[in-house]
Image: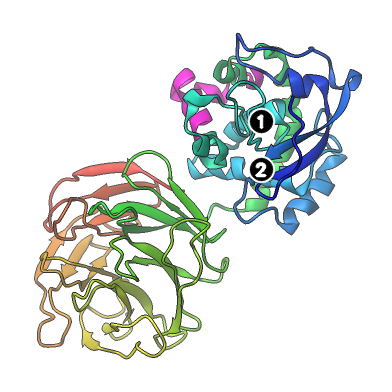
Amino acid sequence: MKNPSCTAAALCVTAALTTSALLGASPALGAESGPDLPPALAPLTAQYQTAACDPAGPTTSDGTLATQLNSRLNSDMRGYLTAYRVSCAREVVEAVRARGLASRAAVIAITTVIVETHLQNISEEVDHTSLGLFQQQEWWGTRAERLNPASATNAFLDAMVRKYPNGSWASAPIGEVCQAVQVSAYPDRYQVQAPDAQIIVDALWDAAGPRTEDVPISGDWNGDGIDTIGVFRPSNSTFYLRDTNSGDATRIFKFGHGPSGDIPIAGDWNNDGKDSVGVFRPTTSTWYLTNGTTTATNTTDHEFIFGHGPSGDQPVAGDWNNNGYDSVGVFRPTTSTWYLTNGTTTATNDTNYEFKFGHGPSGDQPIAGDWNNNGYDSVGVFRPTTSTWYLTNGTTTATNTTDHEFIFGHGPSGDIAVPGQWNTNTNTTPGVRRPSNNTVYLRNTNSGGPVDTQFIYGI
């Protein structure tokens, strides 16, 4: 076991752990193993280099929960929970919730992490190439993926559902499932930690409250000319973006100000060929836009007011004048009026376009895109009660006729419109996300017809 000095680049956590936990913490079969001693017989204080689990760091609530749970636990973690360790457990639980799995899946995952690392995201290779919460070796993924709690948890869950298909993991003994995934030299260590894992998961699952529905967005996050789906989770102000319409989120970062009614948007604010994100705060008509899609780059690069306060305005974004920069606009459903601006600063955010398009207060959802591939974005509405799309190629009163009208979706099922350019160098076409089953349905043409692409994403 290494005992490195703490560096500014690493969060070093000192933990009173056992020899068995440190040297024999469930290595893969064939790996070197340390002494197989129970925790009570081999206390040891050790330092690890660790990575943050929550990019924003532990919260005050994490610390409070650690204090509350320490005396309730009965095995290895009793007295050793910290705000950091709770933040790691929280991220694992959140990843399970994001997949829509039952809390038992979180108990299985937390049981595994207690045994492997005592809820620490270890960033140094202690056991061969093992890294992260689950001590996953290099064949589990890249270094970044193994140190990303969401990616690491999903890799674990992927293996779990492969080994226990059709939900059979839900009734199998927890320790057995952990061992099947981890293939440990010490299979008996998991089950004894399951009761404590249950206590931790119960506290975190309940604290999270009812699952908050993710809000879908689309954008070209990597500049490859193809839009992909992302979601904004209002409960933690976190964006989950990915560069392809398959797999897990590849860009996870916080941006926004918590559950204050912020509405997510996406656009290319700086003409760099890549979309980034922002939020619109309807209570103050304030826009917060960032040019970055990582934790390191998601500063507020543009902040300005555009709109008319708490009047139900709904945000859109697009390149209204074909200058390469996306700017913003609002749709006022009470009057079916659109107010669009070519600017993203207080000095430039005059209303450049004002016109009516839509059908009044009928629940229409505002959308924007380049429907005819002419380089100019225009607007449209999606009517979820009938799954009807009404799109216009114009942004003036004289040109805002309905140029495209078609049905795509499944009626009054709560579908949320999320159009995008799903193919390279083509026009924007429809997509919907159905919160009831977290499924995204995409179509490659502006017409009614079958779904071209379908997948599950978000919670």
| Disc ID at residue 88 | 2
Where, by quadrant of the figure, is residue 247 drawn?
A: top left
**x, y percent for residue 379:** 21, 73
Q: Residues within 10 Å of mark 1 (few under 14, many from 20)?
A: many
Camera-side residue: 205 or 445? 445
User: What span is in magenta?
Assistant: 154-175
- 272 sits to left or right of 106: left
Q: Secondary structure at mark 2?
A: helix
Q: Marks 1 and 2: CB-CB under 8 Å?
A: yes
Q: Residue at x 45, y 83 (%)?
A: 304
Residue at image mark 1 = 113
Q: Is residue 351 visible?
A: yes
Identity, as a three-letter code, of the amino acid under mark 1: Val
Is residue 45 positioned above or below 437 on the image? above
Q: Is residue 101 visible?
A: no
Is residue 282 positioned above or below 437 on the image? below
| Disc ID at residue 170 | none
**x, y percent for residue 355:** 21, 87
Where, by quadrant of the figure, is residue 314 drawn?
A: bottom left
Is residue 40 positioned above or below 443 on the image? above
**x, y percent for residue 48:** 73, 35
Identity, as a three-letter code, of the amino acid under mark 2: Cys
Camera-side residue: 447 or 351? 351
